[in-house]
Amino acid sequence: MRLKETAGWNQTGQDWERLLELEPDGCFGLEQDGVLAAAATAVTYGEDLAWIGMVLTLPEFRGRGFARRLMERVVAFADSRGVRAIGLDATDMGIVLYRQFGFEGAGTVERWERPRSAGAVEGGDVGPWDPAVDLDRAAFGTGRDRLLASLARWEAASIPGLGYGMGRPGSKAAYFGPCVTRSAGAGDRLLRWFLARHPNEPVYWDILQGNREAAWLASQYGFRPVRQLTRMFRGSPIQGDESLVFAIAGLEYG
């Protein structure tokens, strides 16, 4: 938690535990003088994709090559699983390092934030969560059943035949995502469902550059863009449909 706090990130202890649960052999840490000085994680989606996240180094240990050593280890882990591509969402600080490992830019992720002062929202009409496996695979580009089942333990809802939305707590803001839908109208209903459950709370929402309807919705409900990351891949990127992805699952999941 100290690692992510020094970076100002939103993850909770439960988020770390989920990564360890999903991919115990893909989570790496580097200790120095009895301190967890750096970390990196990977989650695999069959043989199609590995996703790297949580690449962090404590400020007092930066400049010693710790991130490079962990990237070597986490990329080797992904390669050992025989995946066709490795992806990550890069901060400006990390782009140069990732390019040295063969990662190339493939798009942009924008983080939008809704302040706690934005006001209450009336909930949308939704039903219980349905995995919508075929729709999610078309949106993401490969199956991620284990991840969705784990995230569904928190908040999840669906609109039959149109899509689903999820959310979870964060240390700085409630997090909306993933959300996969066939239409902006369904996305609006799922967003209102989530916002109604989190009145007077700040909310984060990560949106792919290729879904401008999601960005338009965000602006209508008082969100504003606060951060950009570069989506990068090593190998052939998976071919999903960004027009269906109204919110990603998280920067550590893709």
Image (spheres, grey):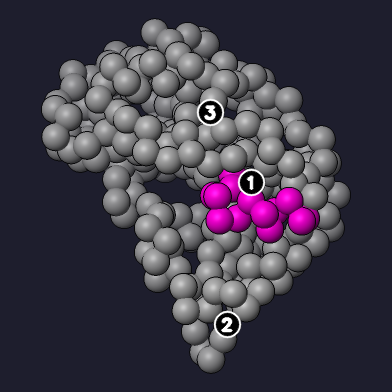
Q: What quarter of the picture does the N terminus occupy? A: bottom left
- Position of residue 237 measured from the top left corner of the image (x, y, whole percent): 76, 34
Evaluate if marks 3 and 2 touch, with contact meaning CB atoms under 8 Å apart: no
Q: Position of residue 223 (x, y in %)?
A: 30, 28
Residue 154 vertical position relative to residue 112 in the rendered view, above or below: below
Q: Give the residue displayed 29% in from the left and 51% down from the top.
A: 172
Q: Earlier in the sequence, mark 3 or mark 2?
A: 2
Residue highlighted by disc 3 = 208
Asked which secondary structure carries label 1, the reply is strand
Residue 227 at x, y percent in the picture: 42, 40
Kind of residue at disc 1: Leu
Q: Earlier in the sequence, mark 1 or mark 3?
A: 1
Residue that carries the numbered disc 1 in the rendered image: 88
Q: Is 241 above or below relative to 51?
A: above
Q: Quadrant of the C terminus?
A: top right
Q: Which mark is residue 2?
A: none
Please state the extent of the stretch shown in magenta in the rendering: 89-101
Compared with 76, 120 (above or below) is: above
Q: Which mark is residue 31?
A: 2
